[in-house]
Amino acid sequence: MKRYISFMLVGLFVAFAGCDSDFEEINTDPNRADGDLFEPNLILPTVSYNYGNMVTGYTGSILFQSMWVQVLASTSTRGANYYSNADKYVISGSTNNYIQGVWNQGYQAASRINQMQQLAMEKGYTNLNAVGDIMKVLTLSFVADIYGDIPYTEALQGQEGLTQPKYDQQSVLYMSMLADLENAINTLGTGTDEITNDVIYGGDIAQWKKFGYSLMLKMAMRMVEVDPASAQSYVEKAVAGGVFASDADEALMFSDQNNGYANSSANALNVQDDIYEVRWSKTMIDFLQATDDPRLPVIAEVPPAGLAANKNGNVVGNNDPAVQIGMPNGYDLKGQTTDIGKEPNYPGSTGEGDDMAPIGNYSRPTGIYRDRDAPIFFLTYAEVQLLLAEAAVRGYNVPGTAAEHYEAGVLGAMTTIGKFGGGTVSSADANAYVAAHPLDMSSPQTAMEMINEQIWATTGLLANFVESWNNWKRSGYPVLTPVNYTGNFSNGEIPRRQVYPSSEGTTNSQNLSDAISNMGGDTWTTTIWWDPGN
């Protein structure tokens, strides 16, 4: 798939240069290509990468949600103090910049999608336009799930003179997005145009339909507590249409470092301070160890002793499950009561003197997370199956039992972790694990807890930290103990949204004010529409 991204620039050159016979007709402006000449399919790789870049790295997910939801942890004090936003909910010097990352990149991505769609419709590319609608819903639903009410129905109309769009209330917004998504799915295949330069599905319309229905399922399950009737209706519609049937269907994008499309999370985790500072949370490691989860040796390692080895991402650590130790969230290295050395189960430092590593005994992510060519997972088969398991527990009309979907989801998670390109979980180990840990159906609550803990773990281990956080907000699982660090910005509660970027107060002040009023505030703990506030 990488070749499609790297060929994009070649395609652009051919589109602009391969027309010598008509030179006089198009040579009205040598620096500008005519719209009729430009091929909109050439924008599709950029559209895909823009979404992938938004959901990873320093845009916000590692700096906020990864530790809010206790997948990762950091002492945040040896050079990488920017992780204080995440691990302790404490402002760092660049917090305001991080706040606006998803907002700015989300609307930039949506604008590029809009550009692709306008060109597509000028050429009668019905299928490409429908793919654009799916990508637009994917992108802006991600933005909405982080901030709450956002511009949608009036967004992206700057060329028409609408520069201050209204914010759609999320209850209305979700219905609009689901309707647009359904229309896009139904439109796919009605055109004669081929989808080219597609780095996700290689132009396979049937696969795009499955992705559309799987996205519909995920969005519908967001609403189970606030609009159960609509949630059930759209879940059943998605299942009838055809969601992911195996891990071969899942939506992911391989990165391409050599051509400037590196995995942004890997970029972050290759920063020397990050290599040292970022550890797996105690919550995550304890969860995996409690059931002898075979993913543990694939994802976690204890570095060799000493600060130099701890800062070296090329050094391979010890991945024996028995030695893995997760770091508790909310600690620092300041020598006071919250110093990690004062934590009751502190395992001690490694190394000596100037080479001493105070957090050296805690588990860090393995090299698969530092691979700049690693894939970015948009939506996986495992997540779809686990959501279907919950839908079955809720009594929705879905084929198969909750236990069957749960088993398929866990097996899928074991397979998908291998797509990072590092270690894998063998089929024998995966099957033994699901046989030993079937879904407990003794009560709906027990089943819900198991299902949603697996969603949290699976999305977290695939570095889809925002999805881990969103599903935790929706379900309340896993049950997490908040950090209450001095000076935190959320009153000792786990943040449930990001506040609006300050720039909106300047460029769209009245509509922003209306949105804040509709939502009941603009704080880190204001609940968005579908969040029941468990």
Image (cartoon, helix red, strand yellow):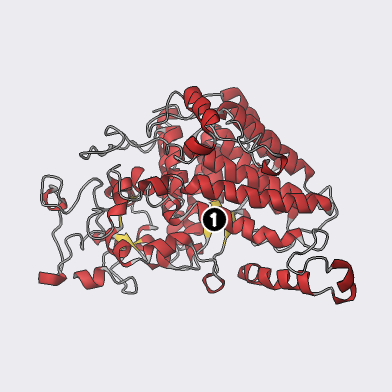
Number of disc labels: 1
> Where's the N terminus, which quadrant?
bottom right
User: Which residue is nearer to you in this view: 266 or 203?
Assistant: 266
- Determine whether, in the image, residue 195 is placed left or right of residue 140: right
Residue 500 appears anywhere in the view: yes
When the figure is inspected, residue 347 is found, relative to residue 15, above or below; the finding is above
Q: Secondary structure at mark 1?
A: helix
Looking at the image, the residue that sits furthest to the bottom is 20
Report the amino acid beneath label 1. Gly
> Where's the C terminus, which quadrant?
top left
- Determine whether, in the image, residue 97 is placed left or right of residue 122: left
Residue depicted at 56% across the width and 50% down the height: 381
Local packing at callout 1 (Cα closer than 10 Å; few below 14, some 14-19, many 20+) is: many
Image location of residue 190, percent across then percent down: 84, 47
Image location of residue 73, percent across then percent down: 29, 51
User: Which residue is nearer to you in this view: 99 or 448?
Assistant: 99
User: Which residue is nearer to you in this view: 365 or 406?
Assistant: 365
When the figure is inspected, residue 358 is found, relative to residue 54, above or below; the finding is below
Residue depicted at 64% across the width and 36% down the height: 177
Image location of residue 351, percent across then percent down: 14, 70
Q: Determine which residue is flagged by label 1.
A: 52
Image location of residue 170, percent across then percent down: 56, 29
Residue depicted at 37% across the width and 51% down the height: 63
Which quarter of the picture shows residue 35?
bottom right
When the figure is inspected, residue 111 is found, relative to residue 514, above or below; the finding is below
Which quarter of the picture shows residue 267?
bottom left
Residue 240 appears anywhere in the view: no
User: Which residue is nearer to you in this view: 433 or 229?
Assistant: 229
- Determine whether, in the image, residue 49 is placed left or right of residue 366: right
Residue depicted at 39% across the width and 36% down the height: 477
- Determine whether, in the image, residue 376 is placed left or right of residue 186: left
